[in-house]
Amino acid sequence: MANIQLSLFDQLRLAEPNLADTDVVRRLCERLLDEAGVKPPIPVALIASLRGIRDILECDQPWAGMLAPENGSLVVRVRASDGWRRQRFTVLHETGHTLLPGFAEAAQFRCNGSKTKAEELSDLAASELLLPRRFFKPDLADAGFSFDGVEDLAEIYDASIEATALRVVDLCDEPALMLSLSRRHKPTERGKEEACEPKLRLDWAHATGAWPYARRHKSVEDDSVFARAYAGELINERGGLGDLTSEDMPPLEIHARRYGSKGRVLALVRHAHERGGGDGRRR
């Protein structure tokens, strides 16, 4: 019978069978950061090299990243058209694959569509490695819950605005919500674009804690905080989500800004308590 090398994921799962998959990945990432002895901004090439990745290459390809075994070692290819900070996340996503079962048996891709369990765990690994919670949580406490804070943290960690904002939601000490909206047609208007005006619509939502169902593809009113953000206003105020959720909400603290050449609106949301300052800190 051939010897089978268990992945680090399987080894830790055998040692501590009660750990959830996400906790296994977090623990492995903490070990990898300890082995590297690094601080932000994380040197992604060094982290990748500790997992046997020999080269990181920029390529013209439709997917964000690919991990493949070549000549006894591993090579990561990242999409040349992506920005540097997105590529950093992609490299660590592919590095995350090396922690999981079966990574060396076939090429792994960072896809743009729906995600498998392995893709979700590799995204988690990328976040844990690029924005380590041991550093990020105290930095978040200083930066505050706002896009001023997100932009400051993105500079410190050399990470994208989106990845940093998602990490803010995940590591916030209370329930939080992130929304992404863009001006587009809804799926039922496909083929009828010339007859229908595009509207600012919800693309996706990411939440921690209990929140009502977010209605993907739902459009917002022209006078909403999100439409005002799309027009260039920096939103830091109390308000509601309108028809974007399936239930009415109590007063919320909303921060929203427009990012990117295509005009995507990102929003950070949490429940409003005492009136906070414009920096998103509780008062």
Image (cartoon, grey):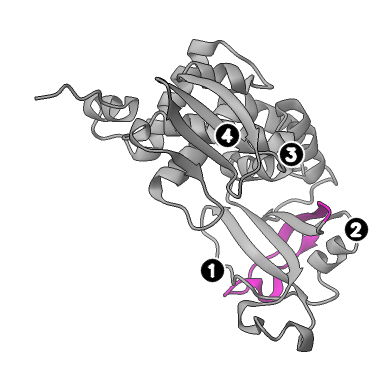
**Vertical placement of 160 versus 47: above or below?**
below
| Residue type, numbered disc 3 | Gly
Q: In the image shown, does 182 or 17 lie closer to the viewer?
A: 182
| Residue type, numbered disc 2 | Glu
Q: Quadrant of residue 279?
A: top right
Q: Secondary structure at mark 1?
A: loop
Comes first in the chain, label 1 or label 3? 3
Whether residues under marks 1 and 3 lie with C-beta atoms below 8 angstroms apart, the answer is no
Note whether residue 131 is visible.
Answer: no
Note whether residue 256 is visible.
Answer: yes
**Vertical placement of 231 versus 97: above or below?**
below
Disc 4 crowd rating (10 Å Cα; few below 14, some 14-19, many 20+) is many
Q: Secondary structure at mark 2?
A: loop
Asked if residue 192 is among those painted magenta in the image, a careful observer would answer: no
In the picture of the structure, the residue carrying the numbered disc 1 is 213
Give the Cα distance between marks 1 and 3: 32 Å
Comes first in the chain, label 2 or label 3? 3
Give the Cα distance between marks 4 and 1: 37 Å
Instruction: Give the label on residue 54, or none.
Output: none
Which stretch did the figure color magenta? 238-261
Whether residues under marks 2 and 1 lie with C-beta atoms below 8 angstroms apart, the answer is no
Comes first in the chain, label 2 or label 1? 1
Instruction: Give the label on residue 77, or none.
Output: 4
Q: Secondary structure at mark 3?
A: loop
In the picture of the structure, the residue carrying the numbered disc 3 is 83
